[in-house]
Amino acid sequence: MRVLALFVALLLSAPTMTAQAPVPAPKTKGRKVLRFLVGPWKDWRFLVAMAPFAVGLSFDGHSTALVRRRRPGAVELNPFLPAHPKPRHMVTFGVVYFVGQTYAAWGIKTLATDPAKPNSLEPYAWAVAYSMALGTVHGLAARSNYRLVTCPSGFYKPPSRPGCVARQ
């Protein structure tokens, strides 16, 4: 027992070894994924490029809400929304859709980036084109929705009356 106690005492009092632990390899895949997820929200040029899509989607959501209130018999044709969407359905769909399309545009921008020309604006041109195409689709949908709730003369259709009335 004394030998064991002496061995433990010597072991504890001996200077610690100076060998270093092996350095793990850098996790490049995890960093690439993190850079992809955070990238669109830190790049102000990219966010400006996504503005046409954001505006078109906002007008589409607003016009859908107007149709829901002023034309109770109207049916939503978007297959991802119910026939008579509530505001929470439209907001949830809009947020999820916007984030998904933002990452799709970021992927297009990333694929269009040339490492030899890091300051090139060409990748942003691809993102602007994608954003404008989506904004146009939603702008046209909003236009048809606004036509359901307004009259050709600029008057509007109140929710309870079938005809057009002058604004007061």
Image (cartoon, helix red, strand yellow):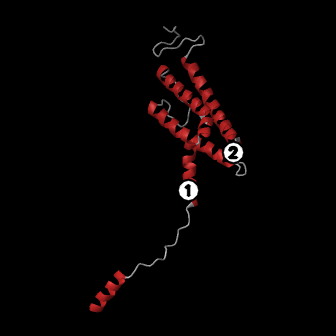
In depth, the one of 133 and 33 nearer the eye is 33
Q: Which amino acid does label 2 sit on?
A: Asn
Q: Nearer the viewer, residue 145 or 128?
A: 128
Residue 86, can we see it?
Answer: no
Question: Could one spot residue 14 in this view of the protein?
Answer: yes
Check residue 31 in the rendering and tell me which mark sits there, or answer none. 1
Residue 105 placed where, x, y %? 62, 42
Q: Residue at x 54, y 29 (%)?
A: 58
Q: Which residue is drawn at 57% across and 23% down?
A: 145
Q: Do the residues labelled 2 and 1 touch (CB within 8 Å)?
A: no
In the rendered view, tell whether residue 15 sits above or below residue 139.
Answer: below
> Looking at the image, which is closer to me, 116 or 96?
116
Q: Identify the residue at horizontal 60%, vertical 33% (top origin).
A: 51
Residue type at tag 1: Arg
Q: What element carries label 2?
A: loop
Residue at x 51% of width, y 14% of height: 157
* x and y percentages locating residue 166 in the rendered image: 52, 7
Callout 1: helix, strand or loop?
helix
Query: Along the horizontal axis of the image, is 19 left or right of 40?
Result: left
